[in-house]
Each structure stands twice: as structure tokens, then as C-alpha cells.
Image: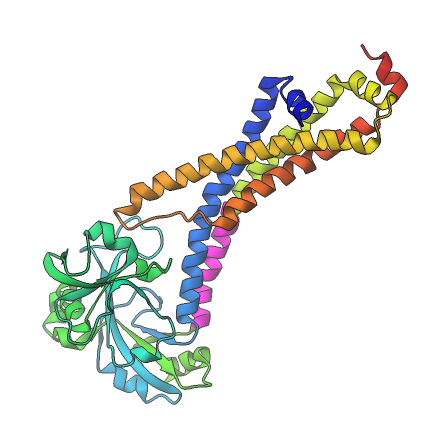
Amino acid sequence: MREIIKNMFRRKGRTVLTVFGITIGIFAFTVMGSMAEKISLLVSGGTEFYSDKVTISQSDSLFLSGPMNVNKAAEIEKVDGVKAVSASVFTSLSKTFDAVSFGPPASITGEQLENRELESFKITYSSGRQIEEGDRGKVVIGADLVKKLDAKVGSNVKIRDKDYEVVGIMEKTLTAPDNSVVMTLPDVQEIYFGELPEIVQSQSKPSEVVNGFTVYPNEGVDPNQLAAKIDNEVSDISAFGPQDFQDQIASATGIFNAILFGVALISLIVGGLSVINTMTMSISERTKEIGIKKAVGAKTKNILGEYLAEAGLIGLFGGLLGWGLGALTVFFVNSATESSGNQIFLLSARISVFAIIFATVLGVLAGFYPAYRATRINIVKALREE
């Protein structure tokens, strides 16, 4: 091992540049992979949430909806296959939606609670409890908003210039609830009603206005088929089943993730080519040395193993350095954005392990051809080399 490391640094500048080439590729993979990991978890959480229900919106978008009358629930409940309907309101935590947001924007949500036991997507609490029907003026805070709102159970937080008592803080889910403030439906209806145009306000009152419904199907009823049925039988609304979430979000984010990994892969290929170049040059400079080793009895597998080990170490050093720089970047960016509740990276164990192993394997693979060439060197010609 000592000889291998000594050989690596015979040409220090060239070896350092080669390691740096791998470092850049692994750095890109670590950072972009962490971004893709966060996106994937958001999508998987959304897929789980929408997997067994139908979501009703006023528009053709699953996530953007205008005001609807709460009495629309009674009309939806009449559709065959519907077990229960819960009205809900979703609006921005600030007075306007964030111009730049990674994932779901910070939001305020509230829904009718009588059908809560039908919800399969369960939330747990790091402290406090869930919101209850009579909790006017009280809120539950998502994990990513705790620092932004300086929230703790029993304290007050200011939401839209009004104080609310915190009764619970949700465990981190790595999905949309992390960036949400949950309150009773009447409380969020008052906030949402105040955002509506005056002409809409003049024709209704806060308790009548919602912007979404969650429909729970009867047992054995396919939610995608039920969504299509609701669309046909109920006017002025759009119904979305699990497949719509896949079509609108999962497919698009899958393409985005592929682009992220593609950019990182190109960087890694460039790093791999630099390993091939370095090892080829190294072997051409050590032809006589290789010939002497073969003359004194070194076997093909010994020579092959020596140069593959050297290439693998170059990959390992580059991988460790690239992962370290990537991890620091992820840490500092997440720390800088934590107070805004808009963290964009998730450096998971599988990304970390894969990055380092991949760098080492890349080094070995890139060094295979030069190492193979070393085993094919003719002893007589090598010993004549000056």
C-alpha cells in the first residue's frame, strides 16, 4: 500500500488534478442528488397522501383553486361511491405566495374534522397535540416553520398580524405538512375570506367559503373512477384522483431528477477520463520499472492489482473530498434557508454511501485499460527502455 501511494504522488501536480476531476463530479452528484432526494420524498409523500382519495378543486389544477360554497359538499356526497366529504381551505402563510419556493410554499390550512378518522396519512407530534374542533385562535405548526415563527407549545405566534396559541408541533414528515400551519376551519375561512374580491365578499360570508374538498370513497371503490364520476355528475368543480397527481407532479419531477443526475453523471465521466489519462501517462513513464518487476517474477495479476489499486485510491480520495465539499454546501445552504422554512436539500445516507462507492468504482473502471496495458508490456523491450 505504501508503494502504491508513493507511486501516485510521483507526479503530484498531475495526481492532484486527477483527484480534483473526480472531486468535481462527486461534488455535483452529492449536491444535485440531495436536491433530487428532497424532491423525491416530497413526491412520494404526495403520492401516499393522494393514493386513496379524491381531491376537489374549483379549477383545472390540483393545487390552485378558487372559492367554492361549502354546501357543494352535499351535492358531492350524493354521488354513488362517496363515503364522506370534508371541506378545506388552503392559503399562503404570507399575504402573497412566495415568488421563489422549493416545494410546497409555507401555507395555512384548515378542514372539517368530523371525518379525520378516515384519513390514512397520519401525522405525529413532537410536542403538544393535534387541532380540535373548538380550538379557535389556536394552531399546530409544521416542523420546518418552528424557527421561522419562533414557535413552541403554549406560546403565541403571529399569523397574518394576529396572535394564535400554539397547541402542537408536528413531527418532520419531509412532505407538505412540514411547511404548514394548521388551524380550525372557521379561523382559516376568516383569513381566506379577507383575501377575496369585494364582489365575492358581498355575496357570501366566511363560513360559506372554502377552496377544496377531500372525498373519501367507499371501500372497494377506485378513487380514479370515482373522480371521473364526480366530474360528470357535479357541475362547476374539477375532481382529481391519484393518477392526476402522478400526471401533474410525479412525471414532471421525474424528468427534473433525471436532468439533475444527468448533469452530475457528465461531471463524473469527465473525472473518469482524467483518471484514464493520468494512469496511461503513469504507466508509459514506468515501462522499464514494470519490465523489471515482470523479469523478477511478478505475475500479471500482481501488476494488474497494483495499478487498479492506484486508480481506485485516486477515485476514493476524489470521492471523499467531493462528498465532503458537497455535504458542507448542503449544510450551509440548508442552515441559511432554515429560518424561512424553505430547505432545498436532503443529504441521505444512501446518497452519501453511493457517492463514495461510485467514485471508487469509477476510478477502478477508468484505470482498467491502462492497467491492462501494463500487463501486456514486453519484458525485453521494457528493459531496453531508457
Q: Nearer the viewer, residue 316 or 40?
A: 316
Secondary structure mostly seen in the magenta stretch? helix
The verdict on residue 257 being magenta is yes
Q: Which residue is located at x 72 percent, y 29 percent? A: 307
Q: Which residue is located at x 38 percent, y 90 percent? A: 80
Give the x, y percent position of residue 237.
Answer: 31, 76
Give the x, y percent position of residue 166.
Answer: 17, 62
| Left or right position of 140 against 51 | left
Residue bounds of the magenta highlight = 242-260
Q: Is residue 7 above or below residue 183?
A: above
Q: Is residue 175 above or below residue 59?
A: above
Give the x, y percent position of residue 270.
Answer: 60, 33
The verdict on residue 232 being magenta is no
Based on the displayed image, in which of its 4 quarters is residue 184 positioned? bottom left
Q: Is any part of residue 48 visible from this angle?
A: yes
| Left or right position of 156 against 307 | left
Extreme residue in the front direction: 2
Q: Is residue 343 above or below residue 210?
A: above
Q: Which residue is located at x 68 percent, y 35 percent? A: 366
